[in-house]
Each structure stands twice: as structure tokens, then as C-alpha cells.
Amino acid sequence: MWLARLSRRAGVGFALLLAVSAIGSESTPTQNPAPPKPVDPSLASKLSEHPKSSETSAKEEDDPTLVENDPLGGQEIIIGRKDETRKPAEPPPPPPAKSVKAEAVCPTCKNRGFKTTTKADQAYMLFESDPAPDPELYFGWTPCPDCKLGLEMKQRFENQKDRLAKRTEVYAAHEKAMGLAFIDFETRNATGHFQTTPVEARDCAKYFEKLSRLLREHCEGDAYLKANPAAQHMVVCENGERYALYLERFSKSHPENEGNWKDLARTTSSFGSRNLTVIRRDAVAATSAGLGHITVFVYAQMLVHEACDSKAPIWFCEGFSSLCESLIFENPWCYSIRYEQNKLSFDVNWTQAVAKGVKDDKIQEWEVLFTREMISMPVLEYQECWSIVRYLYKADAVGFAKLPELFKQGLETKKALEQAFGKPLAQLEKEWRLSAAQGR
Ligand SMILES: [Zn+2]
């Protein structure tokens, strides 16, 4: 199973990331695309600088050309961006406005502008035939009725209500533009367009919501949940023919995205960007669990890219995606490659593999691993990325939740980790080795 992924490289232009998953097999994949070349960096400048989210202003939403030109309902598909001014995706609500003076604290909402409701704890899975729900189900909060900030939040509610009411039109426009039919659904952090059985689509929706809930509860907030269904899309095409058709029509409807990505993507079983991932269903093991692994892995990649504004280092993005996969399925199966072929065969148990690597002194020094570009990365380094991210996640949830913001600020790994966890890097590394060696 292959995934070609378009992503930003170290803040300098963009490059193709090819992801491979050795699902359910210790042998190397049988379908081996030609080694990819880096994507033409000029592609980046041709891509959208203005992704639309559910936070768009009324003026932008009134612009009919956005829907007309874009099969995904005005959501331009991007691969990273230079535009730093993009508003955050929702949920959740923004911090209190600075204009509110300290002495004017709203007793109802403490100047948050909203009240959290029990619906925040409920899974949010909206399929195409379902009636549009109250936005409270989507947000998990309601606007404060007692203050000016509540009025601002009410506007967000209204915007969301509009979007939810129009979503089936957006699905229909997408299907028409692509000439393909899908099972369409949204969760809190992504929209799915699946050519699978309804059961498989629903299983994947459940995995996404389960993962989002785990991350929200563990990190006590939305640090990793900035993706939203208006911006992040996942397409599953049932076979290679339809996958090729999707690529062709997508590229035609986005003529600005010229470059060699199409040729490369045709040779792989899927491709993706921060806002769109397309998967070939028949390239995934023919079980819903197999589809689950790859969809959760790429869902996590969209989450981490969105949360960190595509500024997180490669080791972290990879480790985070594997962590998410293992939060749902215990043992990871998927991995990514960039620029060139890297056929690998993974051990069945990643925890044991890392423990052995530590004991045999075969693992990579952190500071070396943190600068790796994943070209020719060996199996054990992929597993180490996963093990480190998993360790940080389990050891200190508060520190872990600080990382996206620090990466967004452009901090290097060493500084970001030391600031988030309040320890020297050497100390963290020592503690991780001890834990990993014990098979934790
Ligand atoms: Zn209030």
C-alpha cells in the first residue's frame, strides 16, 4: 500500500512524501512505484494561499465563484501555505477578546463567550442522509446568552448552521465534478468521501471520532484538533481506475496545481496533502481493519499538519501518525517515505523491536534522528520516531499539548521539547531509553 503525500519540506518549498504501509505482512509491498522525484517547488506558489474554513467571513461565503470552481465546495486544496494569517479552524472557541476589561468579567461564561455542554463528549458522525443537526452537537458548546462575546459566538453558530444545511449540495457538486459517487460523511475534524460499503465508512468515521476524543481528553483540549470538516477531506476510491479518474479530474479542476505530482501520484496507491488525501481502496488489505489503519494514519497526518501549520519536524509528524494508529489498533503498520523508494519490512511488535534496539545499542541518537529527512530511513528509526512520540505523549500530557504551538512558532526540536517538558534534552532522552528498554 502506497501513499504519495505532498508536504512542506523544512520550510523551504514543498516536496513529495511517499508513504508505504506494510499492512499485515512482513514481506515488502508487491506494488512498487518508481522512485519519486521531489515535486517542482514552483508547485507551492501555484497552490492556494487562502484555504477556506468554517471560519470564513460572510463576504467570503457570499462569493459564488468559490463553490463554482471547486469540487470540494469552495475549499481550495492546498499543500502547505505561506499565508500565516489564516484563521484557526473550529472547534473550539477562541480565547476571550482582549478588548474586554478585567473588571467586566461575564459571570456566566467568565468571558469565554460560550458554555461547554455535554455534547462535547458525544461522537459526531454526520452522514449524507442524516438531517443537519443543531450546531451544538458539532461544537460541544453553546454561545453565552449574557454578554457581547456570546453574540460573536452566536455568529459562529449561525455560520455553522448554514454550512451544515448546504453540505449535501456541496457533496453533490463534488460528485458531479468528479463523475463518481461516494458515501459522504463528516466527523468533527474531517469530511470523508468513500467508495466502500456503508459499514466500512461508518467504521472509519468511528475511528476518527475515537481518536479525536482520545487526543482531546488526554491533552485536555484541542491542541491537536485544528482540522475541520470544511477544510480536511479524505477520498477513498474503490479501485485503480477510479483513483486515476479522480486524479485526472481533480487536476483538471485545479489547473493551478501543475507540476509532476500527477505523474507520480498515478504510480502510487494514494496521495495526499495537508487538506486532501486520496486512497485506492483495492490497494488496502481487503478488510475494514486494513482500511482503518491507513485512514487513521493519514487522518493523523492531516491533524498534525493542521495543528502545527506544517512546521513540525518530520520525525514528529511520522511518530505522531504512528502513535495515533497505535492508539486505535495497538501496533502500527504504516510508514511514510519521501523522494525515493524505501522498501522495508517491519517487525510485528514495535515495542519489542525498540526495546531490543535500545538494549543492543542500535538506536539512533536523538539529535541525529531529529534532523533526518527520511531518505533511506531504516526500520528501527521509524519505530524510534513512534516510540519517542509515544513516550512523550504518555509521560507528560501537558507538555505534549504545548508542542504544536512551539513548532508553529518555528522552534527547533531541541528547544521545543525542552520548553514543553521543562527538562534538558539529554535528560528526556535518558528517561525515554530507560522506559523503552523496559518495553513500555
Ligand atoms: Zn458571557
Image (cartoon, helix red, strand yellow):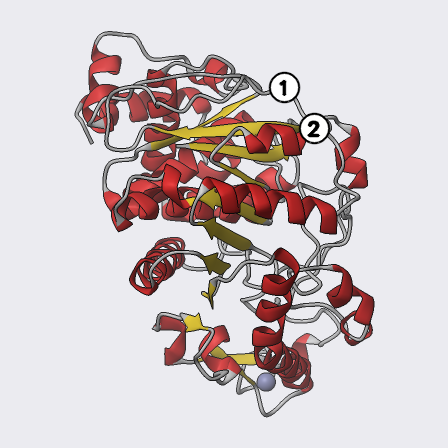
Residue that appears at 76% across and 66% down: 68
Q: Residues within 10 Å of mark 1 (few under 14, many from 20)?
A: some
Q: CA distance from mark 2 to mark 1?
A: 9 Å
* Residue at disc 1, secondary structure: loop
Residue 148 position (above or below residue 413): below
In what quadrant of the picture does the C terminus appear?
Answer: top left
Residue 270 drawn at (x, y percent)? 49, 38
Observer able to see residue 140: no
In this picture, residue 370 sits left or right of residue 364:
right
In this picture, residue 67 sits left or right of residue 347:
right
Circle 1 residue: 37
Specify which label sits upstream in the sequence, 2 or 1: 1
Residue 59 position (above or below residue 195): below
Q: Residues within 10 Å of mark 2 (few under 14, many from 20)?
A: some
Residue 328 drawn at (x, y percent)? 28, 48
In what quadrant of the picture does the N terminus appear?
Answer: top left
Circle 2 residue: 260
Residue that appears at 32% across and 34% down: 391
- Amino acid at pointer 1: Lys
In the foreground, 198 or 437: 198
